[in-house]
Image (cartoon, rainbow, N blue to C red):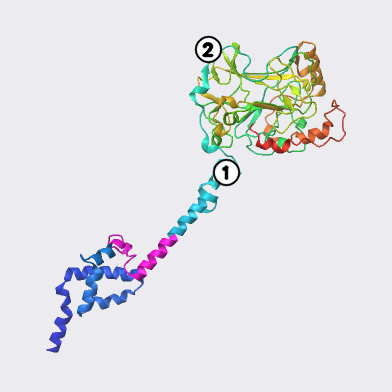
Amino acid sequence: MSAGRRGPARALPRPALPRRARLALAVVAALLVAVGVPVAGLAVLAHATSPTPTLEVHLAAGSDDSGEAKDKDDSGGSGDSSSGDSGSSKDDSSSKSKDDKSQDDKSGDQKDSGDGSGAGKDSGKESGKDSGAGGQGGDAEFPGRDKAGRASADEYTDMSQVASNQQVGQGGQFSGGSYSFSCPLSDHHNSDNFIIAPGKRNGAQHTHDYAGNNSTNAASGTDQSTLEESSTTCTNGDKSPIFWPVMRDLAGVGPDVGQDGGSLDGNVGSFIEPTAVDYTFHGHGTRPVSPMPLNMTLVTGSAKAASTGKGSNAKFACASSPDRVSDKYLACPAGDQMQRVYDFPSCWNGKDLDSETHTEHLTYPDQSGECPTDKTPVPALRITVGYQDLPGRSYAIDSFPEQQHNPVTDHALLEYLSSEARAQAGANCINAAQACTQGSDQDTSRAGRLGFSDQVPQAKNYDSAMADMGSWGQTPSSSSSSAAPAAPAGMAGMAGMGH
């Protein structure tokens, strides 16, 4: 009898709620495993015979009452084991801890993105360092890249829409004689600017064409050796480093894709080689000119004129109509040559080779070509760079990324590294109202494309030029070796200028 009672007693709960009991056991099993109860303990529930464990299983399994629904919602709306984060007070605590950790991780990610550390550093600043800045600190090192864009349609115009006017910009009012020299383009390009940003790689954030000196790069502004040690492309032996932004065919593919100064700074397209370049020093006004001082820095235009509204001296013309000058890109007639005209300032203060803004030591004459009485007239250099049959409106000059290739940012720079003899001969020619050419018969220096230019870091900087040439309050002499006065305080401000 007693044995018979024990058998039915063990089996009683099973036929009462077979499906719900099984479901309840499965859910409880999952919950208990989640909170760390040994699996072996589940056997107690599986074989329980009292009403109490059956009731507990029933509640844990869930029903239509609001308490059970709340548990279900908190656990993600499912009895799945992956959703059992809130089945008990311990689970709630565990869930909170996990959420807090997730929030901490999120805060860490935000911090990383903001200050350049951790994951944000890898995907932001460090990524820029690897591919955007050549290992020099990413966009913080080269700002404005997020503002890069193409020139707008209204920055192009047809030559027929330009009125005859020769007074666009400054300079260009000539009189007396002139002297010219030949300087083919050098074989190298880079995005440095040793005059404005000495020693800074990619200081221009746009690529330059170079003529004359074959060694010009960032080191040219800091290296104590001299540019005179390099070769030159100038046929008269002039070793002046002369440079301006490259012109690009926007439909082409440049050699600097993924590089600083190239596509990373918004400069895309293949280089368009000039078909002709002319370098001529002119007389101006009614006073005689003095020889151009050696190591003089000459700058025309401003690479940041689009954003500052200052310093632009951009001039574009067609060879067939040189009297129609515009500060916009020009569409010239078929077969004609589009020209970039660079007129440099020619009124010298008589003492400085450079100045902080590059506009104080050497300024422009008035519209009649006259210099102020307290300034010394020196030869006015005009460089004309010509391009044959440009591709419609699918061309533009390189620029800082935020300047978006605006034509008003066109500019050119050089340091005058000719010789005293050539400078004096040129001034004599101008003052005699003659048109002269300085050629290879005047100099035995090597000239032309040599193919190793970027491997030659030798450069002339302003401080060493001052030390070599002595006081510029006097006429310089080739034999001068006296100590120079302290250089003007212009060098410290160069890196902030926009060329």
Rendering coords of residue 332 (x, y %): 54, 15
Rendering coords of residue 422 (x, y %): 80, 20
Residue at 73% x, 32% y: name it.
355
Residue 242 visible in the snapshot: no
Q: Is residue 447 above or below residue 144?
A: above
Q: Which residues are magenta?
A: 73-101
- Secondary element at tag 2: helix
Which one is in front in this view, the residue at disc 2 or the one at disc 1?
Answer: 2
Residue 14 placement, left or right of 242? left
Give the residue pinned by disc 2.
Answer: 160
Residue 424 placement, left or right of 117? right
Residue at 52% x, 50% y: name it.
114
Q: Tell me the CA gap for discs 2 and 1.
A: 44 Å
Q: Quadrant of the C terminus?
A: top right
Three-letter amino acid code at disc 2?
Ser
Three-letter amino acid code at disc 1?
Gly
Residue 32 placement, left or right of 479? left
Residues packed near mark 2 inside 10 Å, few (<14), some (14 to 19) or many (20 plus) = few
Inspect the magenta stretch and tell me whether residue 99 lies in it: yes
- Front-most of residues 429 and 270: 429
Rendering coords of residue 323 (x, y %): 61, 12
Give the residue pinned by disc 1.
Answer: 138
- Front-most of residues 236 and 75: 75
